[in-house]
Amino acid sequence: MIPGSRPVPFGHYGDGNIHYNVTQPVEMDKQAFLDQWDEVVAGVHEIVLDLKGSISAEHGIGRMKRETLRKVKADVELEMMRNIKSVFDRNGILNPGKVL
C-alpha cells in the first residue's frame, strides 16, 4: 500500500458486502497517487481472495474490474453472468459498455 493512505470500507456490513476506497495521502501529488492505483487495487483484491471473498460490484462489473473478474471467475461463471444479463437486457442498453 501507499504510506499515508487510509482504507475507507463502507457499505452493507450486515450482509457481508463491503465496498472500499483508499484515500490519497494528504501531502501526496494526485497523479503520483493515481499512478500507483493498480497496485493498490491488486493488494486489496489479494486480501479479499485470501479471505475467500469475491470481487463484485453492486451495479455491475465495469471496465475497472474486467481483468480481475477474468482471474477470479471460471469461464462457465462468466458465461452464466452474460446469459443472465442478456435475459434482462436483450438490446444491451442497460449499463452500456460494461462487462456485466
Image: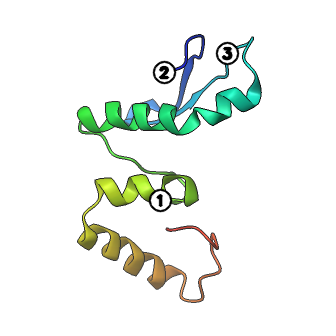
Q: Cβ–Cβ below 8 Å for labels 2 and 1?
A: no
Q: Earlier in the sequence, mark 2 or mark 3?
A: 2
Label 3, label 1: how far apart the Cα atoms are: 27 Å
Camera-nearest residue between 1 and 93: 1
Q: Cβ–Cβ below 8 Å for labels 3 and 1?
A: no
Label 2, label 1: how far apart the Cα atoms are: 22 Å
Label 2, residues with CA under 10 Å away: few <14, some 14-19, many ≥20: some
Q: Amino acid at mark 1?
A: Arg
Q: What SS does tag 3 mark?
A: loop
Snapshot quadrant of residue 6 = top right
Instruction: Please state the horizontal and vertical placement of residue 46, each as a whole percent of the image.
Output: 33, 35
Q: Amino acid at mark 3?
A: Pro
Q: What SS does tag 2 mark?
A: loop
Residue 25 tag number: 3
Q: Earlier in the sequence, mark 3 or mark 1?
A: 3
Residue 1 tag number: 2
Label 2, label 3: how far apart the Cα atoms are: 11 Å
Residue at (60, 89) in percent of width and height: 91
Q: Amino acid at mark 2?
A: Met
Snapshot quadrant of residue 78 = bottom left
Residue 18 tag number: none
Residue at (55, 53) in percent of width and height: 64
Residue under pointer 1: 66
Residue at (24, 73) in percent of width and height: 76
Instruction: Please state the horizontal and vertical placement of residue 97, each as a whole percent of the image.
Output: 62, 71
The reply, left or right, for residue 9 in relation to residue 46 is right
Q: What SS does tag 1 mark?
A: helix
